Image: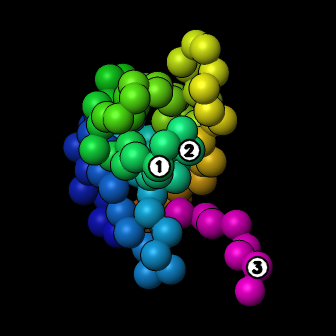
């Protein structure tokens, strides 16, 4: 997609494969996580981004969008899967792992 995300903003994207990602822009660096919180399956992109930390709107789990690390204590769920985002000529692309057929 287009790299038109404002600094300090995030957005959910649905890929042609059906996978849904949260993409955040932190000072011109882009980061991507699975959009669905692994705690209870809520959409992280519907939550709040405060600096590098996204707070899930359902139960308040907090993840670092740069690493996917769960910041909330106690740890009620796992870290979020993160993906590498490349920016070329104003277009974002996300490197996804190979899916098993």
> Which residue is nearer to you in this view: 43 or 5?
43
Question: Can residue 28 be seen by looking at this rendering?
Answer: no
> Which residue is nearer to you in this view: 52 or 71?
71
Q: Could you tell me residue 97's position as x and y percent?
A: 70, 66
Q: Which residue is mark 2?
A: 38
Marked residue nearer the N-terminal end (3 or 1): 1
Label 1 packing within 10 angstroms: few (<14), some (14-19), many (20+): few
Quadrant assignment, res 76: top right
- Give the quarter of the figure containing the C terminus: bottom right
Q: Residue at x 52, y 52 (%)?
A: 34
Left or right for 65, reference 78: left
Left or right for 65, reference 23: right
Q: Which residue is mark 1?
A: 41
> Which residue is nearer to you in this view: 60 or 34?
60
Q: Could you tell me residue 59's position as x and y percent?
A: 40, 29
Left or right for 97, reference 16: right
Quadrant assignment, res 53: top left
Q: Indicate which disc residue 100 carries.
A: 3
Is disc 2 in contact with disc 1, using a CB cutoff of under 8 Å?
A: yes
């Amino acid at each position: 997609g287009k790299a038109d995300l404002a600094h300090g903003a995030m957005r959910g994207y649905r890929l042609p494969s059906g996978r849904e990602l949260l993409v955040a822009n932190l000072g011109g660096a882009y980061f991507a996580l699975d959009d669905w919180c692994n705690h209870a399956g809520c959409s992280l992109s519907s939550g709040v981004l405060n600096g590098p930390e996204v707070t899930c709107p359902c139960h308040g789990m907090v993840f670092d969008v740069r690493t996917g690390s769960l910041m909330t204590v106690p740890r009620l769920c796992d870290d979020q899967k993160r993906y590498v985002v490349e920016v070329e000529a104003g277009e974002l692309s996300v490197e996804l792992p190979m899916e098993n057929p």
